[in-house]
Each structure stands twice: as structure tokens, then as C-alpha cells.
């Protein structure tokens, strides 16, 4: 029984080895945490935990897509694999969540930057999932610099 569990846990990774999957998921969590920390530090909705979950989920969907693409279809199978669909699905799903963080009260809009941060966390997770952690790290660093710098230059007007 233990051999069966061990086999199931260690050999189900057909496209991405377990160690690489762990590295990509951890990178997504760390970069999502950096994005969420900025929101959390300014007491904005959808902070640290939300951004981590969005980034890790996007990374996981990407890893799942890679595994699905690695499945060998038999002649009778009509398995259609299109990795772009994963990106579209993650983008749509995160956009739905992000839209929920946006609140309008008359002419005031709140939560737009937080929603954009969640959307970015999804992109960072997708990038980590594809193995492009340096691109995800660069986007994260640039985002933190921009949000920090603009907060210093442009006074907050309640639009975060």
C-alpha cells in the first residue's frame, strides 16, 4: 500500500519533475507574497494571502496543462491540447475575482489597483508555471517599484 502511495505521488508528474514543480510553485508563492505585501501594507483589500493564492493557482493550472499536453493520445482519442486556453482561463478567472474587489461610489472608484495586482499575480503564476521565473521576478520587482514610487510622487486619492 505504501509503495502504491509513493508511486502515485512521485510518478504522476509526466511533463514536469516533482522537484521542478515544487520550485515553480514556491517561486509563484513568494512572488505573489511580494505583490500582496504591498497591498497588505497599505491596508487594501485582497492582500498577502489572496495574491499568494492567485499566483499559486495560476502556476498550478499551467503545470496541469503541461501534464495534459504530455499525455500521448491514441488513434481513437480526440484529445485536443491548446496551452493558450490555460492562459485565457486563468486570465478570465482572475479578472472575475479582481472585478469583485472594485467598488464604485458615485464618481469614486476603489480597489482598481488591487484588482490589477491580482491580475498581475495571475500572470506571475503563469510565468512561474512555464518555468520563466526570471520574467515573473522582473515583473514583480517592477510592479513593487512602480507602486512604491507612484505612492510617493502622486498623493493617494482613495482609488487604491
Image (spheres, rainbow, N blue to C red):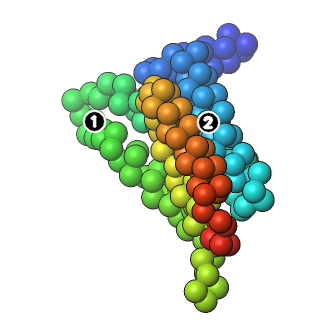
**Secondary element type, mark 2:** helix
**Which of pointers 2 and 1 lies earlier in the amino acid sequence?**
2
Q: Nearer the viewer, residue 39 or 80?
A: 39
**Secondary element type, mark 1:** loop
Q: Answer with the quarter of the image where residue 2 lies.
A: top right
Residue 60 location, x and y as percent?
A: 54, 36
Please give left or right for residue 82 compared with residue 137 in the image: left
Mark 1 Cα shell of 10 Å, populated few (<14), some (14-19), many (≥20): few
Residue 90 location, x and y as percent?
A: 47, 50
Please give left or right for residue 133 compared with residue 28 in the image: left
Please give left or right for residue 82 compared with residue 96 in the image: left
Residue shown at 60% from the left, 28% from the top: 27
Residue shown at 65% from the left, 65% from the top: 155
- Mark 2 to mark 1: distance in Å? 38 Å
Q: Nearer the viewer, residue 123 or 43?
A: 43
Please give left or right for residue 149 compared with residue 14 in the image: right
Disc number placed over residue 77 in the picture, else none:
1
Q: Answer with the quarter of the image where residue 77 lies.
A: top left
69 versus 109 height, above or below: above
94 versus 21 height, above or below: below
* Most distant residue in the top direction: 3
Disc number placed over residue 155 in the picture, else none:
none
Question: Mark 2 sits on what residue?
Answer: 31
Which image quadrant: the C terminus?
Answer: bottom right
Q: How many marks?
A: 2
Residue shown at 66% from the left, 40% from the top: 34
Q: Nearer the viewer, residue 118 or 23?
A: 118
86 versus 135 height, above or below: below
Amino acid at each position: 500500500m505504501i509503495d502504491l502511495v509513493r508511486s502515485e505521488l512521485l510518478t504522476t508528474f509526466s511533463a514536469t519533475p516533482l522537484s521542478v514543480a515544487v520550485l515553480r510553485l514556491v517561486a509563484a508563492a513568494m512572488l505573489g507574497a511580494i505583490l500582496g505585501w504591498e497591498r497588505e501594507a497599505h491596508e487594501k483589500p485582497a492582500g498577502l494571502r489572496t495574491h499568494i493564492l492567485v499566483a499559486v493557482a495560476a502556476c498550478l493550472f499551467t503545470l496541469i496543462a503541461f501534464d495534459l499536453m504530455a499525455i500521448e493520445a491514441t488513434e481513437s482519442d480526440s484529445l485536443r491540447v491548446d496551452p493558450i486556453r490555460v492562459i485565457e482561463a486563468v486570465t478570465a478567472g482572475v479578472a472575475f475575482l479582481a472585478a469583485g474587489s472594485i467598488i464604485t461610489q458615485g464618481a469614486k472608484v476603489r480597489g482598481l489597483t488591487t484588482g490589477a495586482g491580482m491580475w498581475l499575480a495571475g500572470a506571475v503564476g503563469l510565468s512561474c508555471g512555464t518555468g520563466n521565473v526570471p520574467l515573473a521576478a522582473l515583473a514583480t520587482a517592477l510592479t513593487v517599484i512602480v507602486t512604491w514610487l507612484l505612492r510617493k510622487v502622486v498623493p493617494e486619492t482613495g482609488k487604491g
